[in-house]
Amino acid sequence: MRKAALRPVTKQSAENQCTTILRDYILSGRVKPGARLTETALAEQLNVARATLRTSLHRLASEGMVVQIPYTGWHVTALAQKDVWELWTLRASLEGLAARLVAESMNETFRTRLTSAMDDLVAACKSGNPINASRADFALHRTIIDLTDHDRLKFQYKQVEQQVRFFIVNSNSLLGDNLNEIILQHEPIVEALISGDGKMAAERAWHHNQTEGEKLISSMSAVSTHETDRVS
């Protein structure tokens, strides 16, 4: 009997584990945008060498999750209004194209995977856990991308997917406890996809990104105005 060609199990490097833990910490929403990240304290908490921690921080910087400010140190990225505009327009372009391609190629396998991803989102929102809700939110969008037979589209999305996750966490934080709104945002997209209407799926994907992007920008503008008024 011929043996199956199996890839051997390998251990994750300390750098990979450290990067994953830090990324998940930032995406949990437990650390605020702009917050300072102290190398010594983080290295002690994670029980890793500072060199290992620094490698992870540089990886996260390449993903747009953190920034290094000269003479100040590391900080969680604080999105500016231009950042939000760039992210939602780029994301809408990629996800709109993906939605059209998937809808126009709809089959039973696609329906099953989309339905499963939507069910996971509903369950996560119903659980009342915002971290799980945002994770399932991104997973649904990632499923749509993965279903396309478009390698270059997948590659481009991969370049910004951590920033997309960061965007989703920030956007969903505006909802507070109203996680059911996340379900209502995505149902029309999935319905258009499953119906096989490529034009409608693309339009709804774009509309979703535009609505969430403009809401986040509006919220940021309101906070900025409030802080200006308080200072004056």
Image (tube, helix red, strand yellow):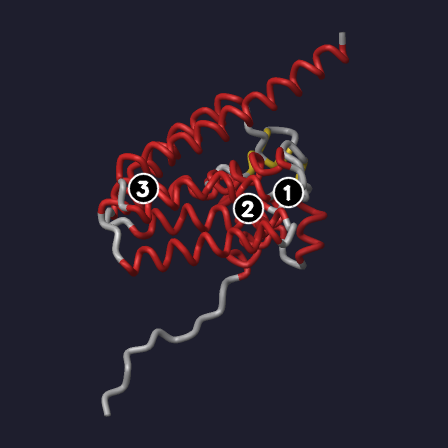
Secondary structure of the residue carrying tag 2 is helix
- Would you say 208 lies left or right of 14 here? left
**x, y percentage for residue 19?**
54, 52
- Would you say 40 lies left or right of 2 here? right
Q: Residue at x 34, y 32 (%)?
A: 203
Which residue is tagged 3? 99
Mark positioned earlier in the residue sequence (1 or 2) = 1
Question: Which image quadrant for residue 72?
Answer: top right
Q: Are marks 2 and 3 in contact (CB under 8 Å)?
A: no
Which residue is tagged 2? 134
Q: CA distance from mark 2 to mark 3?
A: 20 Å
Quadrant housing the C terminus: top right
Quadrant housing the N terminus: bottom left
Farthest top residue?
232
Which residue is tagged 1? 29
Q: Nearer the viewer, residue 17 or 169?
A: 169
Q: Nearer the viewer, residue 145 or 128?
A: 128
Q: CA distance from mark 1 to mark 3?
A: 28 Å
Residue type (three-letter) at the residue carrying disc 3: Ala
Q: What crowding class fits label 1: few (fewer than 14 Cα within 10 Å), some (14-19), or many (20 or more)? A: some
Q: Are marks 1 and 2 in contact (CB under 8 Å)?
A: yes
Q: Residue at x 57, y 21 (%)?
A: 218
Q: Residue at x 51, y 51 (%)?
A: 121
Say which mark, if any, is on residue 222: none
Residue 74 visible to an observer of this rendering: no
**x, y percentage for residue 41?**
72, 48
Point out the frontmost of discs 1 and 2. 2
Mark positioned earlier in the residue sequence (2 or 3) = 3
Quick check: 88 above or below 48?
A: above
Secondary structure of the residue carrying tag 3 is helix
